Image: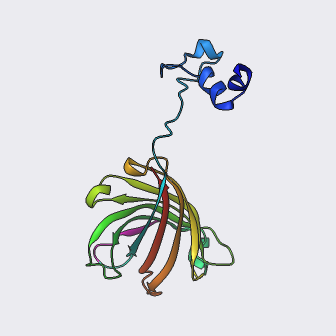
Amino acid sequence: MASSIFSSPLLLLFLSCATNSTPVTSSEQGNDYLISCRLASHVAVEKQSHFRFYWHDTLSGPNPTAVQVVQTPATIKSSTFFGDVVIIDDPLTTRPDVNSKLVGRAQGFYTGSGLKKIEFLLAMNFVFTDGKYNGSTIAIFGHDEVLSPVREMPIVGGSGLFRFARGYVQARTYSVDWKTGDAVVQYDVFVNHY
């Protein structure tokens, strides 16, 4: 019976880490970069939340929320915006109307990364400003092929109530003005969190 107890991987992990939640020092482990080793709590239950926002990317007018910060002579000639870099602080609302309820901001950048198609590398945080999620963030980093009806990008982390977040987002263009570049995009966010 004792041999079967000590063959349990969980028990071995437990014994190799601190038995009373005291950090294991680096000298005990033989390395200088391990600060602590603790068992993760199995009490918290992971859940998946589905949010829907409308992302308002405005490059025109007196109060743009997206600003082009890099453009080269090659970019000016490109029909795919290859090489453009745009910094964003876009409102996230509950409806396609920019005057609907504001629940957060999309802060980050996108850059033209496609030579033959309009494709962007998108790196942004959804920064919540409303309700119980106020101050929490969801981080997104991925490939956005703008003319595809649905684009999927990974959630790579989060903070606050979304600490250890993982999941994905689906983006659907709701409207776009090709003269100004202004766009409204529906984001469906499927996020696993504790």
Q: What is the residue that sits farthest to the front in this orientation?
A: 1
Residue at 70% across, 19% down: 2
Quadrant occupied by the N terminus: top right
Foreground: 147 or 151? 151
Q: Position of residue 52 (x, y in %)?
A: 41, 72
Which portion, as a residue range, is magenta?
62-70
Left or right of 184 on screen, residue 2: right
Asked where in the image residue 53 lies, by quadrant, the reply is bottom left
Front residue of this view, candidates 41 and 161: 41
In the rendered view, tell whether residue 153 sits above or below residue 5: below
Residue 56 position, x and y percent, is 38, 75
Of residues 37 and 139, the one nearer the viewer is 37
- Kindly identify the residue that appears in the image at 56 percent across and 76 percent down: 76
Residue 183 in magenta stretch: no
- Chosen colour scheme: rainbow
List the single residue furthest toward the top. Answer: 27
Check if residue 68 falls in the magenta segment.
yes
Q: Position of residue 58 (x, y in %)?
A: 37, 76
Identified at 32% across, 63% down, the residue is: 104
Residue 35 is situated, as x and y percent measured from the top left of the image, at: 53, 23
User: Is 181 situated above or below 65?
Assistant: below
The relative height of residue 34 versus residue 128 in the rendered view (above or below) is: above
